[in-house]
Image (cartoon, rainbow, N blue to C red):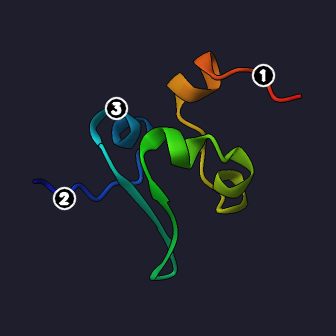
Amino acid sequence: MYILLTHDVDLAVAWAKHLVIMDNGAVRLTGSSEEVYSNTEAVRSLNLNIPFVVETYAPEEK
């Protein structure tokens, strides 16, 4: 098992099996890349970018 700390969302989504998104020392989101980044509203509320691969290949929101 490895722990990777990064602000690079594209790197995180490419390499991590499980993500923990923290804000001011508190856990805000946790789960697989698919689980975390499928909740685009929560991700954007934390002022995070949506990874390129998610923006490119995710179904359009209606």
Task: Give the CA separation, mark 2 to mark 1.
Answer: 32 Å
The residue carrying mark 3 is 14
* Cβ atoms under marks 2 and 1 closer than 8 Å: no
* Cβ atoms under marks 2 and 3 closer than 8 Å: no
Q: How many C-alpha atoms fall within 10 Å of the one at disc 1: few (<14), some, or many (≥20)?
A: few
Nearer-the-camera pick, 2 or 5? 2
Q: Is residue 11 above or below residue 44?
A: above
Q: How many C-alpha atoms fall within 10 Å of the one at disc 3: few (<14), some, or many (≥20)?
A: few
The residue carrying mark 1 is 60
Q: Is residue 5 above or below residue 27?
A: above
Please give the label number shown on residue 3: 2
- Could you tell me which secondary element the residue under label 1 belongs to? loop
- Could you tell me which secondary element the residue under label 3 belongs to? helix
Q: As drawn, is 33 to the left or to the right of 60? A: left
Q: How many C-alpha atoms fall within 10 Å of the one at disc 2: few (<14), some, or many (≥20)?
A: few
Task: Give the CA separation, mark 2 to mark 3.
Answer: 14 Å
* Percent x, y of residue 8: 41, 45
Q: Quadrant of residue 61?
A: top right
**Mark with earlier residue (3, 1):** 3
Please give the label number shown on residue 47: none
Q: Amino acid at mark 2?
A: Ile
- Could you tell me which secondary element the residue under label 2 belongs to? loop
* Percent x, y of residue 1: 10, 54
Q: Amino acid at mark 1?
A: Glu
Q: Amino acid at mark 3?
A: Ala
**Mark with earlier residue (2, 1):** 2
Q: Is residue 7 above or below residue 23?
A: above
* Percent x, y of residue 38: 62, 40
